[in-house]
Image (cartoon, rainbow, N blue to C red):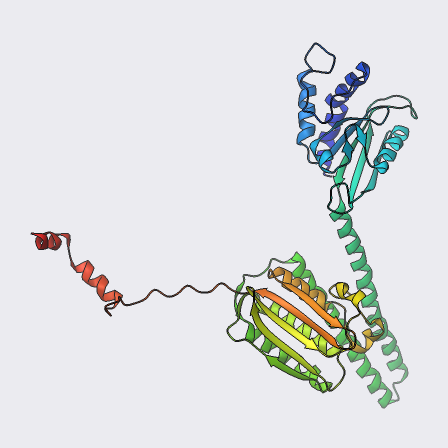
Amino acid sequence: MHPLLWLALGLVLGGAVGVLVARLLTRGQRPDPTGPAPDYLPGSPTPVDDETVLARRLLDLMDPAVVLLDLYDSVLLANPSARALGIVRGSRLLVPGLVSVAHEVRRSGSRRSDVQLPGDLVGTGPRMVGVHGVRLDSGPALERGPVALVLQDVTEARRVEAVRRDFVANVGHELKTPVGALLLLAEATQGAADDPETVQRFAARMTHEADRLSRLVRELIDLSRLQGAEPLPELTPIDVHDVVAEAVDRTRLAAAAKGIELAVGEQTGLVVRGVEAQLATAVTNMLANAVAYSPDATKIAVGTRARSGFAEIAVTDSGIGIPRADRARVFERFYRVDQSRASATGGTGLGLAIVKHVATNHGGSVTVWSEEGLGSTFTLRIPLAPAEPDPIPTTDPAGISRDRVDALRAAVTPTDVQRGRS
């Protein structure tokens, strides 16, 4: 939470709300937590001061969830954000983890912690909230006292942190492999300086590892751009045929080396709006993945068609297929179905992740169908460009050109029209 928000909240809770809670506790009564903010304290013939009413209204307007607990863990106040999370029912706090935080607050004076909320509370799946608990009185520790709990939904923030940690760990691992191989090969080459054949073999291997390292760095840069590091360029009309032709041309050499035939079947006239370089890279990655995991002397089919307002580009191979448990993860960064073949294929585990981000940036999607031993089909779907409006006809029904009609109208002055009427 922003420091200024914490400061404002601290002033509210430590000042006016603290006074409100103190008054409630001394009278032994609590306001109805489901009702509107009262202008009078229960049991009091005099109005609550303006500061207290303003504090309650401010709590109701705050985005973070705020819950005030009395000496016995009953809910004194809960703002609408807290009730929207489903953590309060009547005067009870429903999440044992939050009650535990309140007990810790009474012992230590304040506490920050993350608490998992069950998914059935709000019906949107489990949520993670960051909780800041503050004791509102200044009594001795271990004694019961009123507590304020401030909750902020941190589910997405924690997910992003976990993804970032995994990404850094994976990048370090992927970079370490080719860099370590290059170091060992360089040392071996120095030791075999008098053996030209060995030097040549080591040099070829160094070239392979350097190419792998270069591809990894290039794909990391591409993925960073696609994930928002740079704004998406302006979308322009693109012929799907040109995208497929470019991708096939880039992959033809690798396919020929394994004796794989690339067969293309297209529906003509498909036009999408996008970035041609990104779409070509996505289809190239799909084809490269098919080539890498297909046996020698097989066929890979590339097909395009229009369906439900989208242009579909499908790449079908007869390779090893993908186990059912792995199909949902093939578009994750650095994920490989067959880790043992990573070195043999030279893959980085980023190709399909790039395809997914290209599809998302263009308002489309990518899906996979696969069966072990039968092969796989990856389908990229991109929205079709809206049809161009029909051109305005240049002649009227009588066959006279529109320019001639406009010229005749301009030549007829209002005076001429009046004379014709007379």
Q: Is residue 22 positioned above or below 379 on the image?
A: above
Q: Is residue 141 positioned above or below 281 on the image?
A: above
Q: Is residue 365 positioned above or below 36 on the image?
A: below
Q: Residue at x 64, y 60 (%)?
A: 360
* Outermost residue to the left: 422
Q: Position of residue 131 (x, y in %)?
A: 80, 37
Left or right for 129, reference 312: right
- The quarter of the image holding the N terminus is top right
Q: Position of residue 305 (x, y in %)?
A: 57, 72
Pick the front one: 9 or 191 = 9
| Residue 98, quarter of picture | top right
Q: Position of residue 276 (x, y in %)?
A: 57, 69
Q: Residue at x 74, y 12 (%)?
A: 43
Left or right for 264, reference 12: left
Is residue 218 among what the camera can see? no
Left or right for 233, reference 419: right
| Number of numbered discs | 0
